[in-house]
Amino acid sequence: MAEIELIFWYWWVLALVLLGIEILAPGFFFLWMAIAGLITGIVLFLVPSTGFEIQLLIFSVLSFASVVVWRRYVGKHPEQTDHPLLNKRGAQYVGRTFTLIEAIENGQGKIKTGDSIWKVYGEDCPQGAKVKVTAVEGTVFKVEKID
């Protein structure tokens, strides 16, 4: 089997290709792999005798580690926006008051919001009672009776 010999700039070309994919694809996934390819190329430039397996190991570890670190960073620092509830339709109703269109019996009933009917759960209440939405669990509102 022929031995694979990589030259440092092969990794830099791979980094540019991955950077091009990053520009075309949404998210920040390929960017970290491109940086890993760039660093792997720098290592090979500085230490030309680095074996192919070690190069692959460096690239893989750097790619995996950078993606994991990025995901943790994004998880702890979510993007701030002027409309945080834009794609969270149910969350927009938390704190609002509605009238039951179907009594809450055995913990379940219904309310109408705009042109939609939502299931609710909470303490039993008669039809027409006023309730306040306190939480959203999937497509069901948790409500409490207000006087």
Image (cartoon, grey):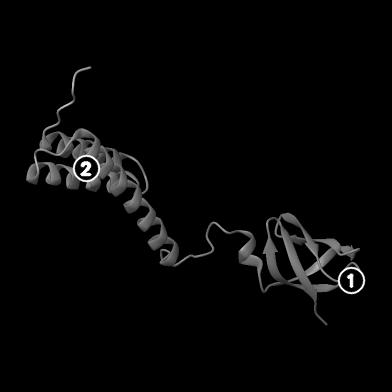
Residue at 71% x, 55% y is 115
Say whether residue 114 is left or right of residue 109.
Answer: left
The circle on residue 55 is: none
118 and 106: which is toward the camera? 106
**Residue 89 image point, x, y percent:** 61, 58
Residue at 54% x, 63% y is 85
- Callout 1: few (<14), some (14-19), or many (20+) C-alpha neighbours within 10 Å? many
Residue at 30% x, 42% y is 60
| Residue to which mark 1 is pinned | 125
The circle on residue 37 is: 2
Mark 2 → mark 1, Cα distance in angstroms: 63 Å
Picture layout, residue 90 above or below residue 7 = below
**Residue 62 image point, x, y percent:** 28, 49
Picture layout, residue 143 above or below residue 18 = below
73 and 62: which is toward the camera? 62
The disc labelled 2 sits on which kind of residue?
A: Gly
- Callout 2: few (<14), some (14-19), or many (20+) C-alpha neighbours within 10 Å? many
Q: Is residue 79 visible?
A: yes
Mark 2 or mark 1: which is in front?
Answer: 2
